[in-house]
Structures are given as C-alpha cells and as structure tokens.
Amino acid sequence: MAAEILSDPADKDQDMPEAMVAADSQLMEALAVKHSMTQKILDTTIITDREKASLPRWFENPIYSERYMSMRNRVWDIWQKRKPRYVKKSSAIKSIGRVGSSGMFGDLFKFLEREGYINVNPIKDTKRMAAKPIRKSQISKVPPGYQRTKMKKMLATWADPDLSQRQNIQEKRDAPVAFYSLDEQDDDELFQLVPLKAYSSSYPAPFKVVLKADVMAVMDFHAHLVTTEVMGLLGGSFSINDQGEKTLAVKRVFPCKSSSTDIQCEMDEQSHVDALNDFEERGLCVVGWYHSHPTFRPSPSIQDVNTQMSYQELFKDKLTGDEPFIGVIINPYRDDMAASSWFSYVHISPKPNPSKTDRQPFACDKVITPFTFDELDGMMELFGTLVDRYRDNQE
C-alpha cells in the first residue's frame, strides 16, 4: 500500500544531491501507482487477530473490547455511505456522537485507513464549496461562539440571562423536523433541539420505564450544582414477563466527571469505567445515561440524538432487537421559574427501513417508585460526594 511505502518529504536529508532526490521521487511515484490501495471488505461479524495485535488498548479492558466492534462498524458504515468522498476523523466523530477516548478512536480510524477498509483511493475535492445563503431562521439562533463547544453553550452567556432573551433563543433553537439524516447536518445545526414525539396505541412504546425516586433526586441535585452541563450513567435491568411485557427498571445512578473538547462535552474515561464497575458489583447493567440542559428545555439536540443512537446500538440485544437504553435530560433552571425541574426521558425509534439512518426521538412514559429508608444513606453519600466535587467550582 502506498501509505506504507512513501516517506514524508520533510524527513529527507537536506544535503541529499538533487539528482538522487529526483530519482527517489520518481521511484516513489511509480511505487505509489503500482501499490495503490485495493478496497477491502470488512467482515462486521468478527474481530481478527490482526486487529487485536494492532490495537492493544482496545482489548486490554473488557469494557472497551465490548464496544470495539460497534464503533468499528459505525466507521465502516459511514465510509460506505460517503465513498468515494474522503471521510475525516472529526466528521466521523460528529456522526457517531460520543466516542469515549479520542486517542483510542484515532488509533482505530488510522488502522482502518492503513488496512484499506476506509478512505481507499478517495476523490479529492478540487472545488471550493459555495457559501450557503443565510436562512432567516439562522439569524440570532444562538449566542456568538455557541457552536465552538457544547460544554460551554450554557456558560457565562446563559448563566443568568434576561428571561425574554432566553425565551427568544429557545424558540429559535427548536428544529421543526420529523425525520432527518445524521450525515447532512451542518456543525451549528447539531445543537438544534428536536421535538419529542409521543407514543400512541398505533405506535406503542417498546418497553415500560420504571424509575426509583432516589435516582431522580440524585440527577436533579447534580444538575443544580453548576450552570454548565453535567452527565452520568444509569444502572438497572431489563426484563420480559410471561405475557411478553417489557420493563426497563432504573435502579441506580452514577454521576460522572466530564471534560470538554472543541465540539462537545465528553464523559471522563475513568469515570465511565468506575460507573460500569459500580453497576456490575450490584448485579446491574447499564440502561441509560443522563445530562442536563441547565437553562433551556430538555428536548434532545441533534448531537444528543446521535449519541443516544450510538448507545442504543451498543447495548442492542442481537437476538430480540430490543434496545434497552434511555436518555434522561434535566432542565434545572426553568424559564417559567417553576419549583421543580423539567425531565425528559428519551428513546430513539427504530430505523424506518434498513437503507436509512433517519430515526426519530420519542418521549418515554415512566413510573416513579419510592425508595426505602435503608437506601437513604446511599443517596446522602452521593450528595456528599457531589458537594465535595463541585465545592470549589468557579464555572
């Protein structure tokens, strides 16, 4: 493959005679043509020994090895849809949503390129893309610099804005869409809010959601501690009774630490591992995640939908097709100054057909169950941990 033969011209000895440089250049060009990449077909059902040897970090921890195939297959699917156009790593991340460790994802992306699975003889764009006309709905849609980082979208600018300004921003950020394609969104459109559909008798919910009151209390408390986004994971179980009724029970919450990147808020890698270990010790599995929209309505953004879809695909039951994983969004500082927070429980509908990636977010109905006094100590311990974590927070 050309990538394995060609060296970086910047690495050449500056004192090399011009004739040798010219000859070397001609030889490399000839080899590049002779050894141009041939598209390999990825077997999406297996993991090869070469992958394990080339990407050891993915297979040192069973938590990451379980995610590997899903993440790899998502990158492969993106290339299949876009080829022969070149797929950038940053573009793949935006399509997939949260990818965990960016370094490990980068290793995976480079491996697929090097082995000839993606970006094989891509067509380079030679034309500069014409600027898109500004739509009226885009004007003043978000504060200046909003799209720079998702982590900062509710920081100082929105920490205590005028009520009328917040309402104006909120209305303009609603995306009047039903189904949409994840591959056709502009960067700023990733943060538009998507209205939630309601389940009905003609389109019933895939399962019933049962949530413990202490889980709800911890999420609410966590969201109130700062005016920036917070995140966490939910532990519980998924069951099907003799009548075929399906129930997703949320029994425990793990508030996670998070860090920001240039485009989004990322869950801390170690915190993610700690959460999974915490659930496993209690015989629970991961059944959801939560994050806050500090000062605006808890409808998912297009980026949130991408992330939710990734999680549902990751935890999908291959035998039944069930995707027992929900997303919870909390709005602690409401515009209407209500005394209680505004919660949304989100699940993404199945794909309309196998050839599309268009999926729609639905609001899940839930049943809140009380917690016992025996569980009160555990909840208060979590409160204390969160207070210590954010005690000196200056955001």
Image: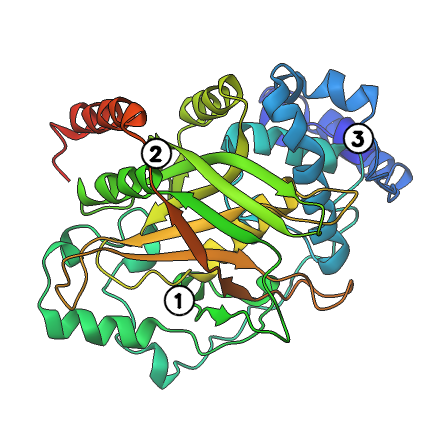
Of residues 123 and 74, which is closer to you in this image?
74
Q: In which quadrant will I find the N terminus?
A: top right
Disc 3 from disc 2: Cα separation: 53 Å
Residue type (three-letter) at the residue carrying disc 1: Leu
Residue 254, position as x, y percentages in the image: 38, 30
Quarter of the image for residue 26 reads: top right
In the picture of the structure, the residue carrying the numbered disc 3 is: 23
Which residue is depicted at the point 72% across and 38% down? 113
In the picture of the structure, the residue carrying the numbered disc 2 is: 258
Q: Secondary structure at mark 1?
A: loop
Residue 93, position as x, y percentages in the image: 54, 46
Residue 76, position as x, y percentages in the image: 74, 46
In the picture of the structure, the residue carrying the numbered disc 1 is: 193
Labels 1 and 3: the sequence-earlier one: 3
Residue type (three-letter) at the residue carrying disc 2: Ser
Disc 1 from disc 2: Cα separation: 22 Å
Using residue 355 as the reference point, say whether residue 283 is left or right of it.
left
Which residue is depicted at the point 87% across and 41% down? 40
Which residue is depicted at the point 15% across and 72% down? 165
Q: Secondary structure at mark 3?
A: helix
Residue 51, position as x, y percentages in the image: 76, 24
Query: How busy is the neighbourhood of tag 3: few (under 14 within 10 Å), some, or many (20 plus)?
Result: few
- Whether label 3 touches label 2, CB < 8 Å: no
Labels 1 and 2: the sequence-earlier one: 1
- Whether label 1 touches label 3, CB < 8 Å: no
Q: In which quadrant will I find the C terminus?
A: top left
Quarter of the image for residue 188 reads: bottom left
